Image (tube, rainbow, N blue to C red):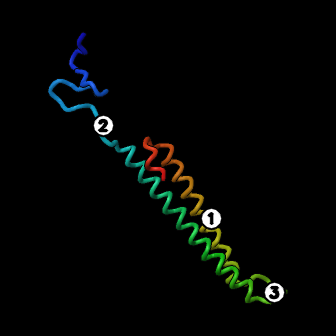
Amino acid sequence: MELSSFEYSGIGVLESSGTEGLTSAPETSSQSAAEAEIRLGKGLVVAGFAVSIIGIIVYCTAAFSAESAQELSGLGKLGLLIIGAGVVSWFAGAITYFHGAIESSSPEDLF
């Protein structure tokens, strides 16, 4: 019994007559886009973490330099703003990473 234009090579690969084996599919543009999203997401998560740590340092510096009855200074408000920007960046990176992970077809790209 023949398989029309394909032949069974004995190792689980169908080979077309006159062409190379069908061993691997070429990488598609959606796969490379998913990998790019994963890399971007990882970078945004790390950047958001670093920015948040800097904001915490600025806020703590302002809080410890102020007197106990004094309101939060401009430096303290700036520290809170920096912390917020870091959290937003981290959250955007997490969403971007997970979106790329969902679109990715190979589990090796996730780690």
Marked residue nearer the N-terminal end (3 or 2): 2
Circle count:
3
Residue at numbered disc 1: 87
Front residue of 23 and 41? 23
At 60% from the left edge and 77% from the top edge, which residue is drawn? 54
Q: Which of the marked residues, 2 or 1, is nearer the chain's N terminus? A: 2
Residue 18 is situated, as x and y percent measured from the top left of the image, at 14, 27
Q: Residues within 10 Å of mark 3 (few under 14, many from 20)?
A: few
Residue 38 falls left or right of residue 86: left
Label 1 neighbourhood size at 10 Å, few (<14), some (14-19), many (20+)?
some
Q: List x then y, in percent, for residue 23.
A: 28, 34
| Residue farthest along the right direction in this orientation | 69
User: Mark 3 against mark 2, which lies toward the viewer?
Assistant: 2
Mark 3 is on which residue type? Answer: Gln
C-alpha separation, residue under disc 1 versus residue under disc 3: 27 Å
Towards the viewer: 78 or 46: 46
The amino acid marked with disc number 2 is Ser
Closer to the eye: label 1 or 3? 1
Say which mark, if any, is on residue 46.
none
Q: Amino acid at mark 1?
A: Val
Question: Is residue 32 placed above or below 65 in the rendered structure?
Answer: above
Please determine whether, in this image, residue 39 is positioned above or below residue 47. above
Q: Spatial distance from mark 2 to mark 1, Cα to Cα?
A: 41 Å
Mark 3 — residue? Answer: 70
Residue at image mark 2: 24
Q: Is residue 29 above or below residue 53?
A: above
